[in-house]
Image: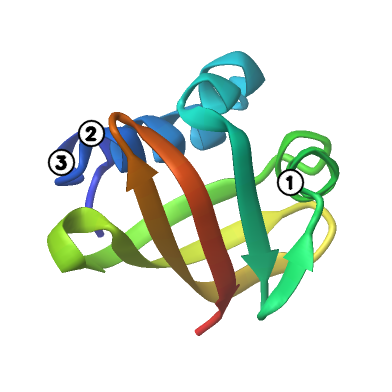
Amino acid sequence: MITENRLSHPAVRTFVSALNAGDRESFLAVLTDDASMSDDGAERDLHEWTDREIFSAEGHMEVESESDDGLSLVARFRNSTWGEMHTTWRFTVDGERISRFETGQA
């Protein structure tokens, strides 16, 4: 496992740390105002999805590996709705903030 503070990319590090802390304010602050996302290849409403899958469901991510200068992760993601899943996460960064993330089952 890679601990949050050892993730290579600062924006991704903030994203994972905020997600794991349930800190919606810090999570949203690391995203651009027009950020978008997809889940298993389907476009999703970012705010609806993050509320349902992360903040209302005690989402938590344990990073197993990273690549692409820290912009791609393989992680175990769990929440109170679905249990634990082996997932991939890919991030697009604009400046110091994340403009898009794509997640799905690994």
Q: CA–CA distance between discs 2 and 3?
A: 10 Å
Residue placed at 39% from the left, 54% from the top? 92
Quick check: 32 above or below 36? Answer: above
Q: Quadrant of the N terminus?
A: bottom left
Instruction: Give the mark nearer the N terminus: 1 vs 2.
Output: 2
Mark 2: amino acid: Pro
Q: Residue 91 or 105: which is nearer the viewer?
A: 91
| Residue neighbourhood size for the residue with mark 2, other residues' Cα within 10 Å, grouped as few (<14), some (14–19), many (≥20) | some
- In screen coordinates, is 76 left or right of 85? left
- In screen coordinates, is 70 left or right of 37? left
* Disc 2: which residue: 10
Q: Is there a contact, CB below 8 Å, between mark 1 and mark 2?
A: no
* Disc 1: which residue: 46
Q: CA–CA distance between discs 1 and 3?
A: 26 Å
Residue 73 falls in image quadrant: bottom left
Instruction: Give the mark nearer the N terminus: 1 vs 3.
Output: 3
Quick check: 11 above or below 1? Answer: above
Q: Is there a contact, CB below 8 Å, between mark 2 and mark 3?
A: no
Q: Residue furthest top?
A: 25
Say what secondary structure mark 1 lies in: helix
Camera-nearest label, 1 or 3: 1
Q: Position of residue 18 (x, y in %)?
A: 49, 28
The label shown at residue 6 is: 3
Q: CA–CA distance between discs 1 and 2?
A: 21 Å
Q: Residue 27 or 59: which is nearer the viewer?
A: 27
Mark 3: amino acid: Arg
- In screen coordinates, is 65 left or right of 79? left
Residue placed at 51% from the left, 32% from the top? 31
Mark 1: amino acid: Leu
Say what secondary structure mark 2 lies in: helix
Residue 6 falls in image quadrant: top left
| Residue neighbourhood size for the residue with mark 1, other residues' Cα within 10 Å, grouped as few (<14), some (14–19), many (≥20) | some
